[in-house]
Structure formats: C-alpha cells, structure tokens
Amino acid sequence: MAVQAAESTTTVSLGPAAALSCRECGTRFALGPIFACQECFGPLEVAYDLPSGDPEGLKKQIEAGPDNIWRYAPLLPVPADVADKPNLNPGFTKLVKADRLAAELGVTGGLYVKDDSGNPTHSFKDRVVAIAVEAARAFGFTTLSCSSTGNLAGAVGAAARRAGFKSCVFIPHDLEAGKVVMAAVYGGDLVGIEGNYDDVNRFCSELIGDPLGEGWGFVNVNLRPYYGEGSKTLAYEICEQLGWELPDQLVIPIASGSQLTKIDKGLKELIKLGLVEDKPYKIFGAQAEGCSPVSTAFKAGHDVVRPQKPNTIAKSLAIGNPADGPYVLDIARRTGGAVEDVNDEQVVEAIKLLARTEGIFAETAGGVTVGVTKKLIENGQIDPAKSLVVLNTGDGLKTLDAVAPTTGPTATIRPSLDAFREAGLDK
C-alpha cells in the first residue's frame, strides 16, 4: 500500500517504525506528528518492519539488554541508540507472584500483580512518555505538553526536565493534592482547567491548532500514535517474566482504553515474532462505577460507547469519553473476556486487600482493577484454575484521600506496657 506524506514532516528514523496506519481504513502515512487519518478521520497507530526469521536470536538480544523498556528497542518506534540518550529509563518493573491474594480470591492457577508503581514517577505513564519523548526529539519539538488526570502530568514534567524540554501540562482543577504537587515540583508550567478531563482534552485539541501551540508536542494528542506504543512494553515484560509465556487471563484498568489495546497489540506481536507460543488468552477491562462508559456498553451489547460525566474517587480513570473505548469492546469480545466495574466502596476495600495480602499499596486505579478481579471471579467470568495477571498502574501515596478516612492507628496509648496490654495489643 502506498504511503502518503504527512504535512510538514521531514524524514525521521524511529527504528523499526515504518509508517502510521489508520485503524479504520488502513491508509498509511509517513511518520510525523499526526494522529488522525486524512481520509476517514480514524485514529492512527505505528506500523512496523519488525525483525523476523530468528526468534531465539531476538530473544537473546532482548535478554542481554538494559533492565528497562529499552531492552525492547528493536520492537519500538525509537532510534537504535535510545539507551544512550537522557531519559528516565522506565520499565522492567516487578511481576509479583501474589500467593496470599490468590488464596483470598480462590485462584489456584497462579496470580501475579504487575506492579508499575516502581517506575520513576510511580506510574505506568513513564513508559508511554519515554516513547513520546523520542518522537518529540525526532520531530524537533521544544515543549512537551499533555492533558492529564494526574499521573501523566507528573511523568511529562519529569521526563521533560531530564530530556531538556520545556513543559506545560494541563489538568482538571480538582485533582488529588499529591498528584498536583508531583506534577508541579519539576518546575514546568502546570495549568488547572475548570472542568473535568474531557474539558481539558478539548482545550488541548484547540491549542494544537493555534499559533500558541507551535513547537509543542502533546504526548497524548499529536504524538499519541507513538506514546501509545509504550504500553506494549507491559505485554513484553509480563511474557518475558513468565518465562516467555502468555498469561491465560489479564485484568487491565480502563481510562482512555489505550493501555488495554496496546497490551493486546504487544501480545499479538510476540506471537507473530515467535517469541511466545500461540495460545488463547482473555483480556478483561476494569472501570469505576462512577465513570464506566465502556463497561456500560459491554453489558448492553453495544458497539458505541456513550460518554458519561465522571463521579468517582478513581480520578486517574475518570475519562467519560474514552478514545479507545470501541476497540476495548472489540478486544474483550474477541478474546472471550469482559468489561466490569466496581463502586467506590469496593475500590477502597480492594486497595486494602492488596496491601494486606501482598504489601503493595495501590492507587485508586489499582483498587479498581483488584476489585473488578474479585467480582469477575465471584461471577464465574474469570477461571481461577488458570493463570491470571492483574495490573497495578500507580502508587497509593498519590491517592491517600481515598483510604485516609478509614485508615489510621490501631490504638493510641500511654508509653507503658500496661497500656499496651489494656489496649488488647498483646494478643
């Protein structure tokens, strides 16, 4: 298929990335800072010329690479020397075998938590931003920007400073205080917008088309095709950490839905490359009840995702009009999975359950994922006898307000052994 040239784009080298391809009509475009098809306005994603013919050699090359996402550079839209550039180098976070959580939930086939709170700014967003930074360099941008529900703002602020970019990020005005501080501390501009995330995103789309936005790379708008590819590294790592095997089942939180769709893309690439043996796997999506447009559409059997006004403590997932929602529906149905939601009380209970059983303090998005996992097991939609991977995408220290009202000292006592005994703490 012929590749059309993207406007105002010079030839760039981004490793195996060959073009941008429309998800809807398949039209291909030259690599550039564009995100919508000029033929049908469908979303664009990166198309590759991936290495082939020697899966064992590729596997050895990956295993000999650095302990971060750049070990997968041959499969990503980044230059070959990416590991030598100033970057936060996220990735290769822990895959925790969660035996105590498994016992609580009745899982016998092996339960794992992919804990992405170990990334540089303590969320999976460091992965996607790292890829976007390389695209921004290639296209000559001078300022990094984004619309964000919190975690992305911090990731962009940190990555911009490390890579030598200016930054200006936009957030809803009522985010959790911890996320606001973390986004602001890096010294870039942080702008609160009166409204929810969808209002922020619309504003950023307007700014891109204005002279004010010239030279700006919006990681999740005009750099979105590249940015999204960072989530594939979760799929790569999970399979490598499982001994180059596909998990039987995965539960993934849904905000825009991009993470879920790109994990599926990464799994399919590993199969195509011969790095893992092909077998069926099921993908489940997790949403908060107060912002569950994809779950609502799935349960109703709809193909169209109707926007909702968010009202949930899980603010990192509070996107009422998720861009990748229809594609999430396709993947859940194709793989035999589902999309489910839990209420705020269940989110808090799940945060505490994960902390109590595995010592992992998840933010509210992780509570959504664990809560949905519990619900799907109870409903018989997840098979407890098969392997299961649950994603924790961020650190609970960012969302303390969610658990603070019901979490505190077991007792407050005088500094004496008698007082300790009187409080019943010696049992």
Image (cartoon, rainbow, N blue to C red):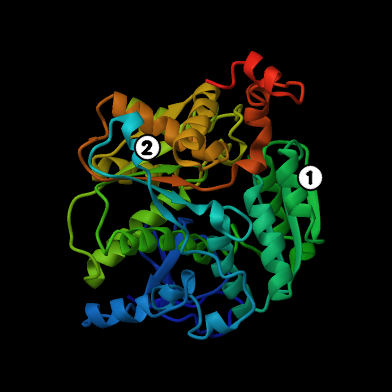
Answer above or below: position of 28 versus 109.
below
Amino acid type indicated by mark 2? Arg
Residue type, mark 1 in image: Gly
Q: Residue at x 30, y 59 (%)?
A: 242
Q: Secondary structure at mark 1?
A: strand
87 relative to 391 in the view: left or right = right
Residue 337 in view (yes/no): yes
In this figure, which residue is indicated by the disc labeled 2? 100
Residue 15 x %, y %? 45, 81
What is the x, y in percent for residue 267?
A: 31, 59
- Nearest-to-viewer mark from 2 and 1: 2
Q: Which quarter shows the N terminus?
A: bottom left
Q: Which residue is mark 1?
A: 192
Residue in the picture at 51% in, 60% down: 36
Mark 2, secondary structure of its residue? helix
Q: Pointer 2: residues within 10 angstroms few (<14), some, or many (20+)?
A: some
Q: Is residue 220 above or below residue 65?
A: above
Of the numbered discs 2 and 1, the one sitting upstream in the chain is 2
- Looking at the rendered structure, the number of numbered marks drawn on it comes to 2
- Judged from this view, the residue extending furthest toward the top is 422
The answer to which quarter of the image holds residue 414 is top right
